[in-house]
Amino acid sequence: MLILLALYSPFGATDTAAPLGRSIPDWAKGNVIFEYFFKGGPIMYLIAAVLIVATAVILERIFWWLIQSTRRSPKKLDSVYAALEEGNVPAAINIARGSKDPLVRVAFHGLSHVHSSVEGALQIASGVELQRAGRFMPVLDTIITLAPLLGLLGTVTGIMGSFSFVGNADLAPTKVSGGIAEALIATACGLGIAIFALVFFNFFNARLARLQFELESTSNNIILMLNSLQNRKGTDQDARQPQQFASSN
């Protein structure tokens, strides 16, 4: 966000005098980004911490989704479906065993409980996958709300600092304008972080919604195939009973 402020500054040069008596370290003088940081007041430390957390979460989620995309195995899932269509549940379990694809993993957990509660096993496995995919999303959601509030807090403290000089005999316009500059810097950084986090938050939410749909589709397909298999077995048994009765007579 400070980079945007540096680009906004004409020719990248600023006055090294910080507003409201705030000092700029010697090592930061001449660096536009750090000068803006120190001119933004003490709230900038909190805003910088929020930016670091947001960046870390976003990078972690990007790498996580990239890794997950390499683990997808549609062919293996189709093989599981093919084995179920043939009525070979043990073969379908063996195919799905040890897969890193979340859809195949859900299918494996459901088929492993074929003699108990298939729907319950599928729901639990899907919930685990969604929990992994939605990791740190509440953190991003909090940052989207927190960053503008911190910027607003910087605005308030900056304006308060400006008005503290009003009415003084040694009123200096640079002190008043410096407080307003501090307020605007904090506000701009807070809004910039919120916008930055919001874009990725919506992107990750879209990926999460898509994964949820795929998990629900896989679970429904497994349930329908198992029900169809049971119906076929029931039909075969009904067809055998008249033959057995006729042969006994």
Image: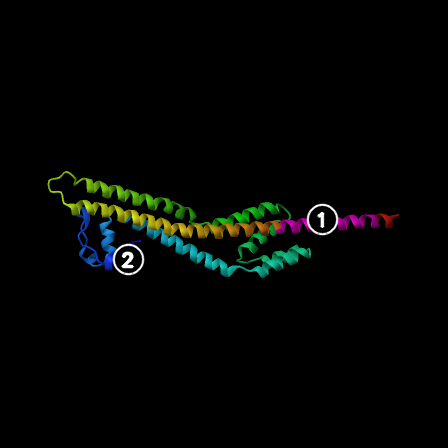
Q: Decide: few, some or many residues near mark 1? Use Cα within 10 Å; few <14, some 14-19, many ≥20.
A: few
| Residue 91: percent from left, percent from top | 64, 58
Task: Look at the numbered disc 1 and give the secondary structure of its residue.
Answer: helix
Q: Residue 183: horizontal and vertical position, in percent?
A: 25, 45
Image depth: mark 2 or mark 1 in front: 2
Residue 150: name its quadrant: top left
Q: Amino acid at mark 2?
A: Leu
Q: Which residue is mark 1?
A: 231
Tell me, yes or no, whether the highlighted magenta stretch contains residue 240.
yes
- Dividing the picture into quarters, in which one does residue 58 lie? bottom left
What residue appears at the point 22 percent right and 54 percent down from the top-left corner?
35
What residue lies at 16% left-to-right and 46% top-to-bottom?
A: 173
Which badge, 2 or 1, is on the more N-terminal residue? 2
Does any portion of residue 41 appear in the rendered image?
no
| Span of residues in magenta | 221-243
What is the secondary structure assignment of the residue under circle 2? helix
| Residue kind at label 1, given as amino acid type | Asn
Given residues 240 and 17, the one toward you in this image is 17
Farthest top residue? Answer: 167
Determine which residue is flagged by label 2: 7
- On screen, residue 53 versus residue 239, left or right, reads left
- For the point 27% across and 55% down, the residue is 8
Residue at coordinates 61% horizontally, 49% vertically from top-left? 220
Q: Predominant secondary structure in magenta?
A: helix
Task: Examine the structure image and report whether residue 22 is included in the region drawn in magenta.
Answer: no
Left or right: where 32 falls relative to 198: left
- Number of marks: 2
Give left or right: position of 213 versus 50: right
Is 129 or 182 nearer to us in this picture? 182
